[in-house]
Image (tube, helix red, strand yellow):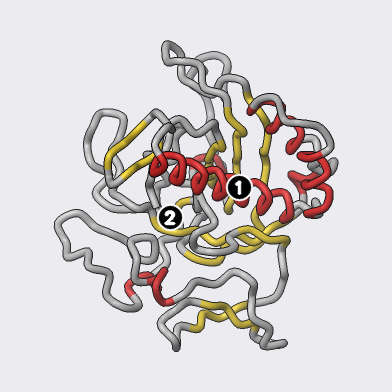
Amino acid sequence: MDNQIQGYGYVSDTDESLKSKTGGKFGLNQNCFLTKFAYNPNVSKEGQPVREAIEIVVQVGDKEFKDWVAPITQVYVKNVVTTTFTTPEAITEYNAALRQQGGLVTHYLKAMGVTEDAIKNALTLTPITSFADYAQRLCALLPAGYNTRPVDVFLEYQWNIGTKENGESNGKTFPTLPRSMKGGYFIVGARGGVYTEDTTDGGLKYIENTTRAEHPLFRSKDFMESKKGFQQIEGQDNAGPANAAFTPVAGAAQTSTWETPAAGQA
């Protein structure tokens, strides 16, 4: 980011910084990077309540996809938001959300070569006293240079059409990082090779052209027919016809922000 306003002067028409950023298509994206996985005691914008979280940044091509893992402050119970976890239903939903969150951070760490035993040991040797304690133990497990280790990433479509900062609709859904393990694995160490999509069973898998090995990132037929598996476009029928997801949208604008995801979003 520039620290001061620039004056008039020469700019080459071959300057790479002038080009639109590309990257981040639906489905398999190879040779990406987890560039940040770090505890931050306050990720909120100025003037908003303090909100701690693990910040996550994944570089896909020229684009950064951002997410966070934060303390769970609300859940849905029968489609109604609750911020108190006293009823059996609310406790059940809270515990389910917590398990998804735990699986998510394990998944990121394993993609960086951290073993499940190392994660278990870090979280069980002594009682966890706070979210900050929990997050810092996890982040300390990352190996040196983790942000230079290539990974393969599966991006899914946003669940709902979002809005811009001025309140206007984005007009369509865009590829985004999964926020839970509900769809399956989505980040693994880079596998290498050239892969071809296989959609013969209604799901989506990737077969290496030479070895015929199947990539560990794949999606089921049910996933592909859900709102995560196809692009919704405002004003069009968004019922999710079969194979609607197989048109990549490389280079589409990504609208990730540090806003808290809606509780209960699939």
SS of the residue at dot 1?
Answer: strand
Q: Residues within 10 Å of mark 1 (few under 14, many from 20)?
A: many
Question: What kind of residue is marked 1?
Answer: Gln
Taking the view exactly as shown, the residue that stands out farthest to the left is 235
Cβ atoms at labels 1 and 2 below 8 Å apart: no
Question: What kind of residue is marked 2?
Answer: Pro
Q: Where in the figure is residue 254, as x and y percent of width and height?
A: 42, 46
Taking the view exactly as shown, the residue that stands out farthest to the top is 47
CA gap between label 1 and label 2 equals 13 Å
Q: Earlier in the sequence, mark 1 or mark 2?
A: 1
Q: Residue at x 29, y 47 (%)?
A: 78
Give the residue at mark 2. 175
Q: Residue at x 55, y 50 (%)?
A: 100
Q: Residue at x 35, y 42 (%)?
A: 76
Q: Any mark on residue 227, and which?
A: none
Is 16 left or right of 116, judged from the image as shown?
Answer: left
Q: Any mark on residue 59, and which?
A: 1
